Image (cartoon, helix red, strand yellow):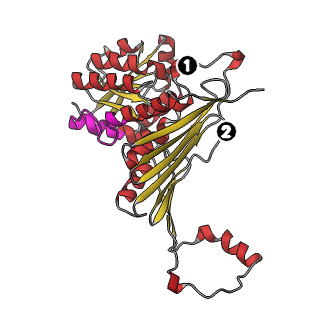
Amino acid sequence: MAQTVSWGVLGTGMIAQRFVSDLLGRPDARLAAVGARSVGSAQAFARAFATPSGAPAAVAGAEALAARPDVDVVYIATPNGDHMASALACIEAGKSVLIEKPIALSGGQARRIAEAARRKGVFCMEAMWMRFTPGVVRAKAMLEAGEIGAPLHLDARLFFPRSPPPDGRTDDPAEGGVILDLGVYPVSLALHLFGAPSQVSGTILDRGGAATQQAALALAWPDRTATLSCGSTGEADNAAVVVGARGRLHLHRQFLCPPFLTRVRTQPAPAPADRAAPRRHAVGRLAFAKRLLQPLDFRRVALIPTPYRGFGLRHQIDEVHRCLLAGERESPIMPLADSVRTLDILDQVRARPRALEAVA
């Protein structure tokens, strides 16, 4: 493949706009064409992202985009329910694909995409940009280096408030709801840091539609656990923390692309022989001040900045370029097997009876 990678983008929403903004920061990337359900939408997008060398072509639909000989790889940023059909159309045309998360609506659909890509011999990856952001890359390296000892537990939460659909309309169940939009992130993080779990449990609380849900999952391995949650019913700190035998590691808001990490060393418990005789402890202002300053104990706490480029999407683009130029069909950091496993886990939770909340 030539050193310049020519991209086609299918979809014109906010994520596609951010993606192309980060894409054009690479001198060896070229936006060749934009596809959308309507040519007018594609043309407006193409004009907005025109470069001095000209505007990308505008076409209607995945088939027209995949048929263009000047496109090496297609970024699919259409609604969730369209991912599989668009991916299969591009793959069948011999195009490599980067598919926005979730890669599909179920583990079965993800398998169909993976099998098609392997059969055609083209590159295929889920756009799980989180795995490539500097903060997550650094966190994984720190865990593998044993900086907080053996990992024991992961807690990750992702809550963004979402307005209900206007005019009394209901959500399209084909899009999968909040558990697919947001739940893929904490589950994928758990797989990335801990591997495939041996036990899965969870529940979805439904407040009257796919957009008004929250979910909680519990994953277990022989030597560690994870509690994961997501929802559109409120706003959380959207952080993650890994507890280890000798410390803990915080991935700060948002853990998808954390601007910094905090590593906290565990305060060792005193040995029985070292325990002092009983005495009366200081109370009042002194005790309060000690607790107030506890987070500033720099003997135990290390603040680690993890700056990222653009919107943070640039780092997954870098990986796609690396794989394409090296002739690799999958990314070792975001393999298709993990995309399938993530959806298999969510499928198990979605198949369970849902907790219904009465709405007054």
Residue named by callout 2: 234
Image quadrant occupied by the N terminus? top left
Marks 1 and 2 sit apart, C-alpha to C-alpha, by 21 Å
Q: Is residue 129 magenta?
A: no
Residue named by callout 1: 173
Residue 148 placement: quadrant: bottom left
Identify the residue at horizontal 62%, vertical 34% (top origin).
232
78 relative to 248, above or below: above
**Whole-percent x and y of residue 65?**
36, 16
Region in magenta? 318-338
1 and 2 marks in contact (CB < 8 Å): no
Identify the residue at horizontal 38%, vertical 35% (top origin).
341
**Whole-percent x and y of residue 97?**
33, 26
Q: Classify mark 2: helix, strand or loop.
A: loop
Relative side of 339 to 302, left or right = left
The amino acid type of the residue labelled 2 equals Gly
Relative side of 65 to 328, left or right = right
